[in-house]
Amino acid sequence: MIPVADDNPTRIAPVVTWALLAACIGVFFWQIGLDQRDHVSVLHGYGFIPAVFFDHAQLPPSLEAVPVWVTPLSSMFLHGGWMHLISNMLYLWVFANNVEDAMGHGRFIIFYALCGILAALAQGLAAPESQIPMIGASGAISGVLGAYLMLHPFSRITVIIPLGIIFYPVRLPAGIVLVAWFGLQLLSSATADPNEPGVAFLAHIGGFVAGMLLIPLFKFRRVRLFRGRTT
């Protein structure tokens, strides 16, 4: 299922969501303009490397771009390819505006960053000696999905279901879409080795759970959880 839209209006313009989209896209275009050597240097200098973060290994000085404690944040703006970027930005576009609307711009920035950091730590703690750079906004966006589930489980999400060469649109409750997505992450993580290159499923799980736990602390008091479907 590929989500493309929801039916929730917002009260405020989601300027932080737009800024995050622009930043990730801008950084990606900068990445694809680098040669292979510089690209590898960027991945190691700005990516989250568990072994370096937990002091099991050190980067050569020539690769150090930011302090190691910054890498859970800097890694969120890097992506490994077009599909990685497009899928993350699509989920951010569909779900983040309503989460930002529920807490305001300033709180949303902190919420997004915290979810991304906790997602990176969830992946890193599972393989603290891994020297594979972890990049992408998936962990933070997973936090947005967890928050959206707590806020709007009954809202309708328009998803595209590929049936062979036909892409069939259908509207489903957000609860079904997001619980199915989370279940897929759980199943995938059961067979994935966190010490090998690939999708950081544990980061997705950690970010999603973080979003569910943090949303009650970050939302405005007037905002109720588990709201009914908007009309």
Image (cartoon, rainbow, N blue to C red):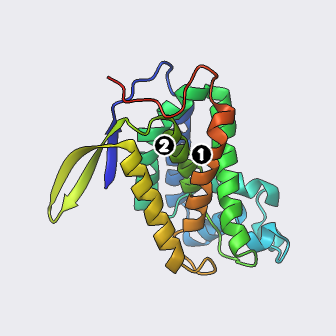
Q: Which amino acid lies under the numbered mark 1 shown in the image of this protein? A: Met
Q: Quadrant of the N terminus?
A: bottom left
Q: Residue at x 36, y 30 (%)?
A: 229
Residue at the right extreme of this rendering: 55
Q: Residues at badges 2 and 1 in contact (C-beta under 8 Å)?
A: yes
Compared across the picture, whether 152 is left or right of 176 comes to: right
Give the secondary structure at mark 2: helix
> Which residue is identified by label 2?
149
Residue 71 vs residue 188: left or right?
right
Q: Quadrant of residue 197?
A: bottom right
Q: Which mark is residue 212?
A: 1
Q: Quadrant of residue 110?
A: top right
Three-letter code, disc 2: Leu
Q: Is residue 88 above or below residue 57?
A: above
Q: Position of residue 139 (x, y in %)?
A: 58, 55
Is residue 124 placed above or below 29 in the rendered structure? below
**Secondary structure category for the residue under label 1:** helix
- Residue 29, which numbered label? none
Q: Residues within 10 Å of mark 2 (few under 14, many from 20)?
A: many
Instruction: From the viewer's side, name the closer residue of 114 and 25.
Output: 114
Residue at screen point 53% across, 59% down: 79
Task: Locate the C terminus and report the quarter of the image it occupies.
Answer: top left
Residue 220 position by quadrant: top right
Residue drawn at 36 percent across, 25 percent down:
230
- Real-space CA distance between mark 2 and mark 1, rounded to the nearest whole angstrom: 8 Å
